[in-house]
Image: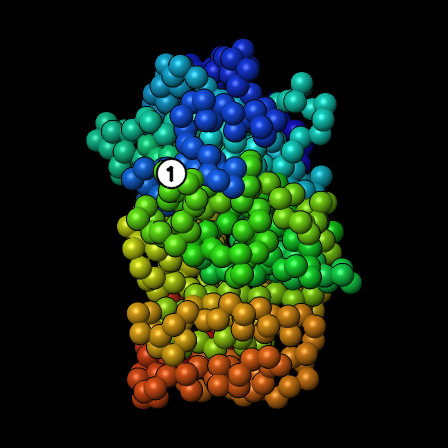
Amino acid sequence: MATSTHKVTSGTDLSAIARRALEQQHANLALPGWVELAVRESDGILADSGALTVSTGARTGRSPKDRFIVRESDSHGHIHWNKINQPIDTERFERILGKITAHLKSCQNVFLTDGEVCAEPEQRVRVRLLTEYAWQAQFAHNLFRRLPPNEPAHFEPDWTILAAPNFEAHPKQDGVNSSAFIGISFARRLVLIAGTHYAGEIKKSIFSILNYLLPLRGVLSMHCSANIGEDGDVALFFGLSGTGKTTLSADPFRRLIGDDEHGWSDAGVFNVEGGCYAKTIRLSPQGEPQIWNAIRFGTVLENVVVNPVTRAADFDDTRMTENTRAAYPLEFMPNSEPSGRGGHPSNIFFLTCDAFGVLPPIAKLTPEQAMYHFLSGYTAKVAGTETGISEPTPNFSTCFAAPFLPLHPARYAELLRQKMQKHHCPVWLVNTGWTGGPYKTGKRMSLAHTRTMLRAALAGTLANVLYETDPHFGLLVPRECPGVPAQVLQPRFTWSDRAAYDAQADKLAALFRENFVNFEDQVSAEVRAAGPRG
């Protein structure tokens, strides 16, 4: 992607803020330097593992209702304007920009991190973060990709992010929805983040930008994790936060390409990021040893409760939020793929956290079903990932990424269709949610069973078993899988009340059909017929 020499002007010169960060020696530090500075600034405390623990205050998840895109001539016709992609006029954006710039200039300290995103050289975008917190600069250091050794000396960002957590917008004066504000200007190549300390907004704002830029170049941007086997076979794991992307792609027998955001170009799959942002609620060394071992000096722990005396992290404590997080560089994973790249996928998995407890733990999808479920993007919003979500809530998030898609979903779906067709890639639906009953009645799917089923699919073992067609959803469900009890594979038999299961399955099937009305005029009759049975 061509380097930009674009500079943000219009009465505010961000170079002065960047220059102050450089003069204060608060720019582009090595990881130990960021940790030392964050502790000195009282941003957080060190846990017994050496990780920096911080609190994000009242907002412990994203604020999607406070995200806006500037209505501008070049991008206006491409943006899919809706309740997620809310428009804001240039005048209001400029007014908020002026206030945030003044706020950052008034701060005693400003911190700067430069990096890039996209491991494929032809797609890379250079990014600069300016923030009032050292720990957020450390977060960006962990999540951005590293610059080549000599590049920082003459770095020119393609995009700039201003993060001002302590600046609060005024809804009436600024014409926004709350004290938090996330604004994206494609013409200015500028992101404003205010009124929230949650660092996930930094990460996801860049992903939203790439979800605009990459498809216009014929590259599919994907909310998925990816890993690669010893034979070079690549697997993709699509899913919203909390569905298991990070956990399931962290496989000791496969190299991790990345845990959350990727692109799929004509050359293959590439990671967007240079780090991981893993959920840590109920983390254990037995269940997720690779993530557990990545939590060490240099890692940022968000909203994890720490014993004030022993400094031991309690990953089971939900007093702050269910959405506890660890941000660490990709190299903290012992078997990560250093190039951040792989070939074309050999398997694709759609991960859904089914709060109804009726979807099978694994099912093979036809190409038409794959398109249906990609556009549907069914899961449950898991507690803490967004402000106001306290327990799993059924949710249809198209392309498993609706909060981050500036373009119409059909653009992403068509790119996926073309690539699946060209590379003959099988697709699987995997339920990482509940079984034996709905949320609060059933239990969460066994992680060990899910891993066993995924490995069987990757190894080709499931190609040699018999399948049954699920009567409610039309999915092809394997009758057997080595290492998994046959009863687990058929969700109806995990319920003590089979009639209650049927009623719950019919309810979810109806929700699928009701949601897909939004896409019926954009797909073939075969795709429309691939959904749950009425």
The residue depicted at 59 percent of the width and 53 percent of the height is: 290
Residue 16 or 437: which is nearer the viewer? 437
As displayed, is residue 229 above or below residue 506?
A: above
Which of the 4 image quarters holds residue 22?
Answer: top right
Total numbered labels placed on residues in the image = 1
Residue 433 or 471: which is nearer the viewer? 433
* Location of residue 283 in the rendering, given as x and y in whole percent from the top left corner: 47, 55
Which of the 4 image quarters holds residue 496?
Answer: bottom left
- For this orientation, the residue located farthest to the front is 309
Residue 527 or 260: which is nearer the viewer? 260
Q: Secondary structure at mark 1?
A: loop
The residue depicted at 41 percent of the width and 76 percent of the height is: 435
- The quadrant in which the N terminus is found is top right
- The quadrant in which the C terminus is found is bottom left
As displayed, is residue 87 above or below residue 408?
A: above
- For this orientation, the residue located farthest to the right is 231
Residue 113 or 443: which is nearer the viewer? 443
Left or right side of 422 for 158? left
* Location of residue 343 in the rendering, given as x and y in whole percent from the top left corner: 73, 56
Residue 238 visible in rendering: no
Q: Amino acid at mark 1?
A: Val
As displayed, is residue 287 above or below residue 149?
A: below
Q: How is the image coloured?
A: rainbow
* Location of residue 306 in the rendering, given as x and y in whole percent from the top left corner: 39, 42
Q: Which residue is mark 1?
A: 309
What crowding class fits label 1: few (fewer than 14 Cα within 10 Å), some (14-19), or many (20 or more)? few
The residue depicted at 36 percent of the width and 30 percent of the height is: 165
